[in-house]
Amino acid sequence: MKCQEFRSNVDGLARGALLDARVRDAAAAHEEACGACAARLADERALTAGLRALAASMREASAPARAEVGLLSAFRSRAAAAAAAASTEGAGVACAVSKSHAPSNVVPLSEHAGARQLSWVKTVAIAAMAAAAAVALFMLVPPFLSTPAPASRSAAKNTQSTPVQTQNNASATNAGRDETARAGVGQTASSPKGVDSPTQKLTDEGVAPGASTQRRNVVRGTNASYNPARVVAPNRGADAADAGEITTEFIPLVRDAFFAQSEGAHLVRVELPRSALASFGIPVNADRAGDRVKADVLLGEDGTARAIRFVR
Amino acid sequence: MAGSKVQTDAELLGLMLGGDEDAFTALYRRRQGGVYRFALQMSGSEALAEDVVQDVFMVLMRDGGNFDPSRGSLAAYLYGIARNHVLRAFERERSFVPLETDADDSNDAPHENLVAHFDPLGDLTRGEMVEKLRQAVLALPAHYREALVLCELHELSYADAAGALGCAVGTVRSRLHRARAMLTEKMRGREREGARAAGGESGVGAEGGDAQAGVLRAARCFA
């Protein structure tokens, strides 16, 4: 055996990994004859021993117990969400779409995201119609009137009260909702709140005054995006408003979770013990810890619980 | 979870994906230590290692169905997920990226955040030598370090390590070889520094600490 061959095998020799007796014998013979290679092998053996000592010194290291507690909690949440999704019973979220494919309490996010599933041809047509309507309004409305035209106001109001119907109405408001919803679900924000877009402002102006406090979850704007600390609601604010419900913002359940634009997602209404609020940093009245609280769980296409919000 | 016989990882995973909490707990307790130690040995950060454990098992809950036993063991699969999270954390937090080590020994010290406190008394005890070795491992470039950690510290086969790292077995072998060579050089360099320091104090020539002496000392320490 030559030095080069010895060096190519020295790792295995030092680690005791070489099984070929002939190679081992030849290496041993070379080791006796060559001082440099012998030193190299000793070097490698020392390193191997050191690495084993290092591994042994860390053998007892393990994740703290709180990691297991947190994961178990997440596992239970997922199991509960999955069970809720599998069940066709329970308190359903009022939604008139996709009932043939989803349980009554499961709301496909794609439906909330407006016209996401429309073809690009329809989208272009909608945009053209919206532009034409805007031009017509600009030409017809006297310049001293700064308030939005009644038509757009009523369209925006309809957007709030009947989301499904609004999807079918090819209005500028609808297109804006689609944009904002998609941005909220599928992108990463450079700033938490994003920038309000003109379309979003138009939508906000059209909101009935009484509903303003119940629309806290409406997407902020086209630049709004998924943020682990702030998950925007996928237009369920309108549904909640209709039902007289107030919701928290969505709280992410998975770190660094992102929603691809093409991903279908579902909202599932579940009930949890009020004590579960504490897990999300929401104060809980100890006297009512045993009560139940409603929550909407946002499920990804793969059934993963991505985010949760609480409903009152 | 039915039965008391020891179940394989794949069996536990199947039960876990079916919603069996006991199976999840058993699988977690069986595998979390390795994942945690891998992340800790890669980063030197306990906090990051804990995060990685959580991330890995969250991914397992979500995408555990993607595990293909024909492509490697579940342990290798988990190491692969952990490795991705660690590397992502390195990218997020530049402070975890070690300095390049090929140039000269003066630059080969790992970042402060990566290392445990250095004991200035030198390699007087085995524990201190292990600590130095740990520092040297942390100072390796990440792609060498991960091969070394998996194959040497976790005793994964080259095939499993290749599965975890997403590369060929030959690549693992060559990275491991290179990592060991770099590690040896580092340890030699520290031996030389120690010898110089000792020589300076005692008036003996600083050139006395040659590689051979360093190797022998290290060997005595570990043997």
Image (spheres, grey):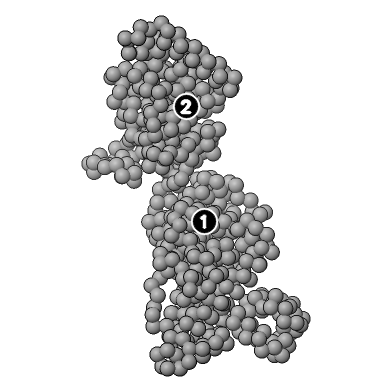
In the rendered image, the vertical position of residue A65 relative to residue A118, given as above or below? below
Badge 2 amino acid: Glu
Query: What residue is disc 2 on?
Result: A179
Asked whether residue B122 is in view, the answer is yes
Q: Residue at x 41, y 29 (%)?
A: A221
Identify the residue shown where x is 58% and y is 46%. B65
In the image, residue A71 above or below residue A166: below
Q: Is residue B166 above or below residue A193?
A: below
- Whether residue A91 is visible: no
Amino acid at circle 1: Leu
Q: Position of residue A197 (x, y in %)?
A: 41, 26
Of residues A303 and B97, the one drawn nearer to the viewer in this rendering: B97
Q: Nearer the viewer, residue A124 or B81?
A: A124
Name the spot of residue A87 as percent of width and height, x first: 48, 32
Residue A58, percent across and down? 46, 70
Q: Which mark is residue B149?
A: none
In the rendered image, the quadrant that contains the C terminus of chain A is: top left
**SS at circle 1:** helix
**Residue that mark 1 sits on:** B87
- The N terminus of chain A: image quadrant: bottom right
Residue A161 location (% of width, % of height) = 38, 17
Identify which residue is drawn at 53% across, 80% down: B188
Query: Which chain does the residue under circle 1 lie in?
Result: B
Please determine whether, in this image, residue A78 is positioned above or below residue A266.
Answer: below
Tell me which corner region of the image, top left, top right, bottom left or bottom right, holds residue A158.
top left
Mark 1–mark 2 Cα distance, whole angstroms, equals 34 Å
Q: Which residue lies at the image location 55% right of the left edge and 87% below the top edge?
A: B210
Mark 1 near mark 2, Cβ–Cβ under 8 Å?
A: no
Residue B115 is left or right of residue B27, and the answer is left
Q: Residues within 10 Å of mark 2 (few under 14, many from 20)?
A: many
